[in-house]
Image (cartoon, rainbow, N blue to C red):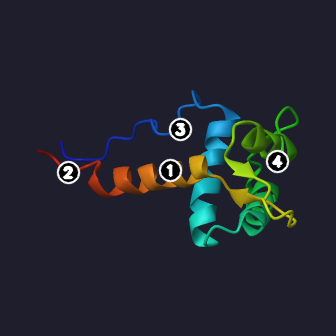
Amino acid sequence: MIGYRFIQNSDNDGANSPFETLLKIFKELLLYTSGDVREALEWLTQLDKEYKLTDGKYGIADFIQDLIDKGYISKPQEGGGGYVPSSKMEISIRKKAFDDLFGKIKR
């Protein structure tokens, strides 16, 4: 018999840490904001309020601190306010874009 078969989505099976989940969303937002970390974090905060992306154990402030600690964002060298994406974040975004474009092509 022809019909639909529903299975659980394997992309978000709960094995990812909260940091990895938020990082994936943050990378997308960073692309939409043309690299403006402040605006991307504001959008992420709004999404968190609407969709409850974080819980009491891990919040947006923890995520921002992890971004700094893991080297994804840094303070600008000139002493200006705010944060800028580091070279590690740029490489990560480029790798994701490359995988999105060429990841599904068969030999």
Q: Which mark is residue 5?
A: none
Q: Residue furthest front?
A: 78
Disc with the residue nearer the chain's start (3 vs 2): 3
Label 3, label 1: how far apart the Cα atoms are: 23 Å
Q: Is mark 4 in CB contact (under 8 Å) with mark 1?
A: no
Q: Nearer the viewer, residue 79 or 45?
A: 79
**Callout 3, which amino acid?**
Asn
Q: Which mark is residue 12?
A: 3
Name the front one of labels 1 and 2.
1
Residue at the image point whose x is 31% and y is 46% from the top: 4
Residue at the image point whose x is 19% and y is 46% from the top: 2
Give the x, y percent position of residue 35: 63, 67
Q: Secondary structure at mark 4?
A: helix
Label 3, label 4: how far apart the Cα atoms are: 19 Å
Give the x, y percent position of residue 8: 46, 36
Q: Is mark 3 in CB contact (under 8 Å) with mark 1?
A: no
Residue annotated with mark 1? 91
Disc with the residue nearer the chain's start (3 vs 4): 3
State which quarter of the image contains the C terminus: top left
Give the quadrant of residue 101: bottom left
Label 1, label 2: how far apart the Cα atoms are: 21 Å
Label 3, label 2: how far apart the Cα atoms are: 23 Å
Residue annotated with mark 2? 105
Give the quadrant of residue 32: bottom right
Q: Secondary structure at mark 2?
A: loop
**Callout 1, which amino acid?**
Ile
Q: Is mark 3 in CB contact (under 8 Å) with mark 4?
A: no
Q: Nearer the viewer, residue 1 or 76?
A: 76
Mark 1, Cα crowd under 10 Å, few <14 / some 14-19 / many 20+, is: few
Q: Nearer the viewer, residue 67 or 17?
A: 67
Give the x, y percent position of residue 87: 59, 51
Disc with the residue nearer the chain's start (3 vs 1): 3
